Image (tube, rainbow, N blue to C red):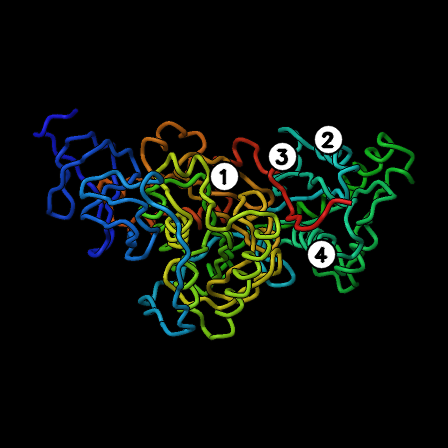
Amino acid sequence: MATASRTCRAVLLRGDDDVAVAPAPIPAGARVDVAGATVEALAPVALGHKIAVRDVAEGAPVRKYGQVIGFASKPIPVGSHVHVHNLRADLFERDYAFASERPEPRAPEPPRTFRGYLRPDGRVGTRNYIAVVSTVNCSASTSRFISERFRGRDFRRSHPNVDGVFAITHKGGCGLPFEGKDHQILERVLAGFVNHPNVAAYILVGLGCEGAYAQHLIESQHLRLVSHGDPAPPPPPRVFTIQEEGGIGRTVEAAVAAVERLLPAADAWRRTEQPASKLCLALECGGSDGNSGVTANPALGVAADLVIAQGGSAVLGETTEIYGAEHLLTRRATSEAVGRKLVDRIRWWEWYTGVFGAEINNNPSPGNKAGGLSTIYEKSLGALAKAGSTPLVDVVDFAEPVKSPGLTFMDTPGYDPVCTTGLVAGGANVLVFTTGRGSVLGLKPTPCIKVATNTPMFEKMKDDMDLDAGTILDGEPVEAVGRRLFDLILGVASGEATRSEGSGLGEEEFAPWTIGPTL
């Protein structure tokens, strides 16, 4: 037991909150300063966990961020550690109040730029890759063998303007209803990657007898290679079929020769000064903790607002992880129709999870809970902070193109590889990933910036984190950290390598969403 003389601090996020957040571990018996008032900790409270700042009766709502994060499953005296042992996620009604709020616009910002690759369709790449695309899992290893022939320093010395040749591999492409939902999603995802502004050229590699065969992909998605200003129509992509080429070895040799023929044109692209309005920013969090909604996510919200203020776009996903907080987005929607599209996706997820006996309101992972997140409502409210404060302009399906400037919501699962695959397929040319526990995801062809929610984790995982938002717990304003992150986004968009790129991550994380049966 700590001595009564020890004083700690907890962060009260809103004046009417029932809990405050520990920016550092609080021992039992410590006096805790909460916005000028003092409470005594009745039990130890770990970093990112919650301490009650007032008594809460059994069954009463508990508030954090000024919103309901759950209901007391037993009486909660002031000073208690508030977590899964005394907090539950009962269902409750949310007032959607469609399009009822008009966020105040930010003051005009000076125009900002970055150095990117202006593509013929007007989008701008932040990277310049060649992709080797497997249409089916049966050609995944072959696709990897092809890309591995272009590794190493010699390749970069010969082709300094090409960031690399990477393989897009997955576990699907067969065993799925032909032209059914999963087939459509897979083709939409693959088309989103090969048509991505960060991809200069690509080839397709198949087995030959798969359901999701290459020619169907080309025709259904109208695939063509990137044009370099040649007035002639761009050609269709090259397809290599293992069964027709005569096996893996011959396929690899033929495909390597084809990639070598694509390299000069890919290497001819040059970075030029481009307006920040050409940024499409993917917003993601994973391995979250109790400080995610206090530090990194609000800072990313500021950066997203700054991108949008420049005329750019930001896209938020993880429908299962805005559950219980979706009313904050419907109120910011530009129209009732946009807000209702979001609610329709929530209702679909309630049905979909119910089919499998799952509960959408029981989502936090063991790691989330260890980090202080108790309910899906608390997790969702913290996750939603990534979306900043601007109006919601559109809601799109998984991997659909993001076409509107401003904030778009994409319907995705909460699982990080699947969600980010959808966001990148939608056209995001920079990905920012906030984490409290230490996620290490990367996803080619889009650079991934990692933002740590707390300094101890940042110091422990310096080789994997790009920015420490834990300084907010030490008094640095959220706005200041958000502006530093915005500057980092511009630097990365201009070619500055992220930690995940330096580690070579980004191919294994490609994961299209599968929602139906495997046949």
* Residue occupying image coordinates x 39% and y 50%: 89
Please, is residue 142 above or below residue 314 in the view?
above
- The earlier-in-sequence mark between 1 and 3 is 3
Whole-angstrom CA distance, mark 2 to mark 1, is 22 Å
**What amino acid is labelled 2 in the image?**
Arg
Q: Residue 149: give its label.
A: 2
Query: Closer to us: mark 2 or mark 3?
Result: 2
**What amino acid is labelled 3 in the image?**
Arg
Label 1 secondary element: loop
**In what quadrant of the picture does the N terminus appear?**
top left
Residue 352 place in picture, x, y as percent: 60, 54
Label 2 secondary element: loop
Q: Residue 497: give its label.
A: 1
Instruction: Determine if residue 404 is in view.
Output: yes
Label 3 secondary element: helix
- The earlier-in-sequence mark between 4 and 3 is 3
Query: Closer to us: mark 4 or mark 1?
Result: 4
- The earlier-in-sequence mark between 2 and 1 is 2
Label 4 secondary element: helix
**What amino acid is labelled 4 in the image?**
Lys
**What amino acid is labelled 1 in the image?**
Ala
Q: Residue 214: give its label.
A: none
Name the foreground residue: 463 vs 342: 342
Q: Residue 181: give its label.
A: 4
- The earlier-in-sequence mark between 2 and 4 is 2
Please, is residue 221 above or below residue 372 in the view?
below
**Residue 294 appears left or right of 56:** right
Query: Closer to us: mark 4 or mark 3?
Result: 4
